[in-house]
Image: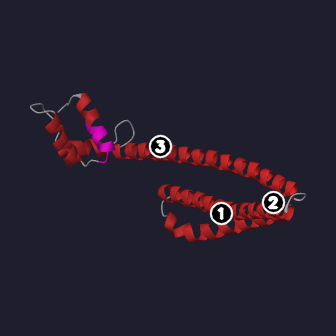
C-alpha cells in the first residue's frame, strides 16, 4: 500500500527522535485519526530496508553523529575563546603585579608587604592555571577517545595499547618542549 509521502516523512522524523516502529505507528494513528496510517511492521520495513542506499538507522546514526560533531566543535571553540581571554587577562595581571613590586621597592614597608602578598597570589593563580591546562588536555584526550570508541568497531580491544602509546608520545613531546625551552 502506498502512503502519503508526508506521513512517511513524519514517521522518519519520529524515528530520528528515537521512537520505535510501534511507538511511531501509535503516534501517527493518534495524530491522523480516520486516515490510513502505516502499521508498526510497515514502519519497521521502512526503517530497516535500504531506501536511497541507506536504512533509516544509518541515516539516524549520521544525523546523531553530525549533531555530536557540531556540539563538540562549538564546545571546543567556546572553551578555546574563554581560555584565550583568561590567558590574556593573566598576562595583564602579571604586568600590573610586577609594576607594583617595582614601585614598592622605593616605598614603605607596608607597600612592599602588600606587593609581596600580590605576587604570592599571582604565583598561586599560575599554579592553578597549570592545573587547568592539564585538565583541558585530559578532557581533550577523553573526547577523542570517546569519538574513536563510537566510530571504530572493536575499539575496546585496542584501547589500552592506544592509551599507552598516546601517553608515550605526549611525554616525548613535553620532554622535547622542556628541553627546547
Residue 148: percent from the left, percent from the top?
Answer: 53, 57
Number of callouts: 3
Colouring of the image: secondary structure
Nearer to us of marks 2 and 1 is 2
Residue at label 3? 66
Is residue 143 a member of the stretch shown in magenta? Answer: no
**What residue sits 34% from the left and 42% below the top?**
50
**What residue sits 42% from the left and 46% below the top?**
64
Q: Nearer the viewer, residue 126 or 55?
A: 126
Q: Is residue 49 visible?
A: no
State left or right for residue 162 relative to residue 113.
left
The magenta segment is 11-18
Quadrant location of the C terminus in the rendered image: bottom right
Q: Compared with residue 139, is residue 42 higher up or lower down, i.e. above or below?
A: above
Looking at marks 3 and 1 on the same chain, the residue that comes earlier in the sequence is marked by 3
Residue at label 2? 111
Amino acid at each position: 500500500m502506498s502512503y502519503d509521502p508526508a506521513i512517511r516523512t513524519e514517521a522518519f522524523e519520529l524515528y530520528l527522535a528515537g521512537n520505535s516502529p510501534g511507538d511511531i505507528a501509535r503516534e501517527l494513528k493518534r495524530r491522523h485519526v480516520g486516515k490510513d496510517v502505516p502499521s508498526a511492521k510497515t514502519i519497521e520495513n521502512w526503517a530497516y530496508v535500504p531506501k536511497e542506499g541507506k536504512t533509516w538507522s544509518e541515516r539516524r546514526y549520521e544525523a546523531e553523529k553530525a549533531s555530536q560533531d557540531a556540539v563538540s566543535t562549538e564546545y571546543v571553540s567556546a572553551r578555546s575563546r574563554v581560555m584565550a581571554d583568561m590567558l590574556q587577562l593573566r598576562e595583564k595581571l602579571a604586568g600590573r603585579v610586577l609594576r607594583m613590586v617595582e614601585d614598592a621597592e622605593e616605598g614603605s614597608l607596608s607597600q612592599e608587604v602588600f606587593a609581596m602578598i600580590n605576587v604570592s597570589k599571582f604565583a598561586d593563580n599560575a599554579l592553578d592555571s597549570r592545573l587547568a591546562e592539564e585538565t583541558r588536555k585530559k578532557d581533550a584526550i577523553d573526547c577523542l577517545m570517546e569519538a574513536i570508541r563510537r566510530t571504530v568497531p572493536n575499539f575496546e580491544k585496542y584501547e589500552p595499547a592506544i592509551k599507552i602509546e598516546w601517553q608515550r608520545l605526549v611525554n616525548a613531546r613535553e620532554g622535547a618542549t622542556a628541553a627546547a625551552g
